[in-house]
């Protein structure tokens, strides 16, 4: 048998020991495919791989690995090396968690979507991204079960095709792990980028074929292993060495006198039996006194003697015969040198540990298995002593006072150390930590740049928007409403609950939304890209931020952050009741661009119209939270000379920015932020998609969110999809907002829509101001009051006639004496508004 494949891509027969792009195959088939590897790599790279596809699959696999009862974990446990604790799968799950991988991406490549060609500086049309090197060949070690799969995941996060070699003595754990990961991606993009081969290093022809098309070769092991692989690395190919390293502890006098320091040092020595590169092999004392070295070694030996015996385990078990011989030889040589006064040895009777004090400072490798050298090294000689070994240095565990730590850290880093920790934490790590002085994802990536014509690309924030659509995993799970999301907000982990906002409360009680700063940063960058698309110029525009501020409302803060990321000139005035002072500030400071809520901007321009018209400097308005009606937009342009009126963003407090306008759009038409969200348009009555072009309920699934799953969230808005590609050239889907579900009122047995009243008031009514509907329960029948903003031409009676003539359902309700219709003109400030956001309340239902 040469190959087998289950329906989910997971293999069956053990003879099929290689995993090749979704299929388990045998030796004969693997040999044939290796001959054609360059073509397979080229075909895989021709198809895009979204970072979100990798994150979603890894997160799903992480969930399975952390669940002891999950069938995936049970299947994989059968392939663990003999004696390996199944808990290693849970540890692996923790490393594959979305939170950890997103933090890794941000730390190493600067963002959660590093492969997108975004502007490096928003003020310039220069686009940069991290691109895959192409194909990475991974030569995995044989003594660490999790290294191989994690190496492939790193290659996938960078977008590469990955071909990995495991030892012929290894189990098929990596093959089956990768099969499970690929099975969680229905698009097949991950499977196309994964090949795992199992063969001995003596099979040089396979090694040569595997490395020939590689753009980077990552190899674990000592100098011999690296040299054996390097012979097959083609010219120009990047060789990434993850070789053996030596680590040490360094103690000042105060620290080595403290019993707590010795306990912490013993933990570092005994954890994993010194098998990790970060395990201390030498303990240096800041002294030149041999007597102090011998005395410390004796004290430390007494501490080691109290430690429990080593637990047998596959990765750090008892020494093999060669290791035993090295341990014996090293100890005997040290004992012989005792007669010369150079050393002193303290060892367990059963040989389970040994402390070897040596009066000579040069770094000496330990034979491991709880074998430690203790040496003198005054800090003035640190660099001269350690620098000759700089290629092999990794971790320095420091113990001393605060000033000592600061000074010593700089010194050991200058000597060649790449990592400094406290004693007792030498083997601990953090998400995204550099390994051996480099970031792995950067080693598997290339930094690329595109320069574009500023005139033609002034409103293009991301080149990829013009090149191809973003394809994110399909939303799954139940639909969520606002109450469901509020309930889930209480489940957000403390580590992810870093920023709190409340909604404006225009459609109900203010709701709490929680973000991590990483999520907030991602969303602000997305909103910034949307503003560029709408025609904002971060170089030339002078912007007054006139959104409401305070009471945990997010608009002012968010657009302050957006302008900060754009590098735009900002006047953070906020919306205030003193319109005269605000207008004077606009004039004095030369503002030409306004950010704000339409209702507030309308009040400001109406109240201070004479001064602002005389100023004549306003050119752009970007609004959010509400809409300017077409008549209001005409007023802005005709009376105030404003040239650009666009939506600043479409979004919600809990989901963040959802859509943006380009220069080809107006009104309620937006592009979807397709790199952050997927959108569904569902029937008004059934939870099924509407027919193309039909209006339905908008449901959003946000993918770029840490710690809170917001999937298939019905936010209360209505909309319809606009088919085809936008004239601006972007592939992002387009949709038109068609009001809110709350704008549809059931009155006197009829369903009436606020937007219909607004359209009739404008044309043919000729009304240019704001409009609000109030519902009251009268003694005999319900009352619907249309409150319109008073102007010199407002005629309530004429508007009433327009409503009755143009809205048959309303006319029927009134003629059947089921409803009283009243139209009244009021001053703009007397209309009901949200106290937090300043939004006009479209419908005020006072019947309850």
Image (cartoon, rainbow, N blue to C red):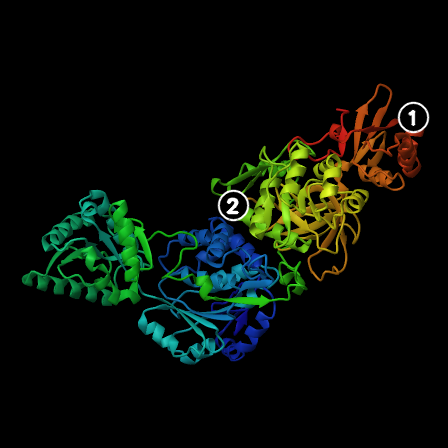
Is residue 843 toward the left or the right of residue 46 in the image? right
Give me the residue at 18% from left, 57% from top. 377
Q: Residue 598: image x %, image y %?
A: 72, 40
* Vertical position of residue 2 compared to residue 842: above or below: below
Pick whichever, 348 or 781, lies toward us. 781
> Which element is circle 1 on?
loop
Pick whichever, 352 or 116, lies toward us. 116
Task: Characterize the local packing of mark 2: few (<14), some (14-19) or many (20 or more) Cα atoms within 10 angstroms.
Answer: some
- Residue 311 visible within the image: no
> Which element is circle 2 on?
helix
Pick whichever, 658 or 428, lies toward us. 658
Mark sitting on residue 817:
1
Give me the residue at 29% from left, 60% from top. 414
Q: Which residue is mark 2?
A: 517
Classify residue 248 by image quadrant: bottom left
Q: Residue 456: image x %, image y %?
A: 68, 64
Q: Quadrant of the C terminus?
A: top right
């Amino acid at each position: 048998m040469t190959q087998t494949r289950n329906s989910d891509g997971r293999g069956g027969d053990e003879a099929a020991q290689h995993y090749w792009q979704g299929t388990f195959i045998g030796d004969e088939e693997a040999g044939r495919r290796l001959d054609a590897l360059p073509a397979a790599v080229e075909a895989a790279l021709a198809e895009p791989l979204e970072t979100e596809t990798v994150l979603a699959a890894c997160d799903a696999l992480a969930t399975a690995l952390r669940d002891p009862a999950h069938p995936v974990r049970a299947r994989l446990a059968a392939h663990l090396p003999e004696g390996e604790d199944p808990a290693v799968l849970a540890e692996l799950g923790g490393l594959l968690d979305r939170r950890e991988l997103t933090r890794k991406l941000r730390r190493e490549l600067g963002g959660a979507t590093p492969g997108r060609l975004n502007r490096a500086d928003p003020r310039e049309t220069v686009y940069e991204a991290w691109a895959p090197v192409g194909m990475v060949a991974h030569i995995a070690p044989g003594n660490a079960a999790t290294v191989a799969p994690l190496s492939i995941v790193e290659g996938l996060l960078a977008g590469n095709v990955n071909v990995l070699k495991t030892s012929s003595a290894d189990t098929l754990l990596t093959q089956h792990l990768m099969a499970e990961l690929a099975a969680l991606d229905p698009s097949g993009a991950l499977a196309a980028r994964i090949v795992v081969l199992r063969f001995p290093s003596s099979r040089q022809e396979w090694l040569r074929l595997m490395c020939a098309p590689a753009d980077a070769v990552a190899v674990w092991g000592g100098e011999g292993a690296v040299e054996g692989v390097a012979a097959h690395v083609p010219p120009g190919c990047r060789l990434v060495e993850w070789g053996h390293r030596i680590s040490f502890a360094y103690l000042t006098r105060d620290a080595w006198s403290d019993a707590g320091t010795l306990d912490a040092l013993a933990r570092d020595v005994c954890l994993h039996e010194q098998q990790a590169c970060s395990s201390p092999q030498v303990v240096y004392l800041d002294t030149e006194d041999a007597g102090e070295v011998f005395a410390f070694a004796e004290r430390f030996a007494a501490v080691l003697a109290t430690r429990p015996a080593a637990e047998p385990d596959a990765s750090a078990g008892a020494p093999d015969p060669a290791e035993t011989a090295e341990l014996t030889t090293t100890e005997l040589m040290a004992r012989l040198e005792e007669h010369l006064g150079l050393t002193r040895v303290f060892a367990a009777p059963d040989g389970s540990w040994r402390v070897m004090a040596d009066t000579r400072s040069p770094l000496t490798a330990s034979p491991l298995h709880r074998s430690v050298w203790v040496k003198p090294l005054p800090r003035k000689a640190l660099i001269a002593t350690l620098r000759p070994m700089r290629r092999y240095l990794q971790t320095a565990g420091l113990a001393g006072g605060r000033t000592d730590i600061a000074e010593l850290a700089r010194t050991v880093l200058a000597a060649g150390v790449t990592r400094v920790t406290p004693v007792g934490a030498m083997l601990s790590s953090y998400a995204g930590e550099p390994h051996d002085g480099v970031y792995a994802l950067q080693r598997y990536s290339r930094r690329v740049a595109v320069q574009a014509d500023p005139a033609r690309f002034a409103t293009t924030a991301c080149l990829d928007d013009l090149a191809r659509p973003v394809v994110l995993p399909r939303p799954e799970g139940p639909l969520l409403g606002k109450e469901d999301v509020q309930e889930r907000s209480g489940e957000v982990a403390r580590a992810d609950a870093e920023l709190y906002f409340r909604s404006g409360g225009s459609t109900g009680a203010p709701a709490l939304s929680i973000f991590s700063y990483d999520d907030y940063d991602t969303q602000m960058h997305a909103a910034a890209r949307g503003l560029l698309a709408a025609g904002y110029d971060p170089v030339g525009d002078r912007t007054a931020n006139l959104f409401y501020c305070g009471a945990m409302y997010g608009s002012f803060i968010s657009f302050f952050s957006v302008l900060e990321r754009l590098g735009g000139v900002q006047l953070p005035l906020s919306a205030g009741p003193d319109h005269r002072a605000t207008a004077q500030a606009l004039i004095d400071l030369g503002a030409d661009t306004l950010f704000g809520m339409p209702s507030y901007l309308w009040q400001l321009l109406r109240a201070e119209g004479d001064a602002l018209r005389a100023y004549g400097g306003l050119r752009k308005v970007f609004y959010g939270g509400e809409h300017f009606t077409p008549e209001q937009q005409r007023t802005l342009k005709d009376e105030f000379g404003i040239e650009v009126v666009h939506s600043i963003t479409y979004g919600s407090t809990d989901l963040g920015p959802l859509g943006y306008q380009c220069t080809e759009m107006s009104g309620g038409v937006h592009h979807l932020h397709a790199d952050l969200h997927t959108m569904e348009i569902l029937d008004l009555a059934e939870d099924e998609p509407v027919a193309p072009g039909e209006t339905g309920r908008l449901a959003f699934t946000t993918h770029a969110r840490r710690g809170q799953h917001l999937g298939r969230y019905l936010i209360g808005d209505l909309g319809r999809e606009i088919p085809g590609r936008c004239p601006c050239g972007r592939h992002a889907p387009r949709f038109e907002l068609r009001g809110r579900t709350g704008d549809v009122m059931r009155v006197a047995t009829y369903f009436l829509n606020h937007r219909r009243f607004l359209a009739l008031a404008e044309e043919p009514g000729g009304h240019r101001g704001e409009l609000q509907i109030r519902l009251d329960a009268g003694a005999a029948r319900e009352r619907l009051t249309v409150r319109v903003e008073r102007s010199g031409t407002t005629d309530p009676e004429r508007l009433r006639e327009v409503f009755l003539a143009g809205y048959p359902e309303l006319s029927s309700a009134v003629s059947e004496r089921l409803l009283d219709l009243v139209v009244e003109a009021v001053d703009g400030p007397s209309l009901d508004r949200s106290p937090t956001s300043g939004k006009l309340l479209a419908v005020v239902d006072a019947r309850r």
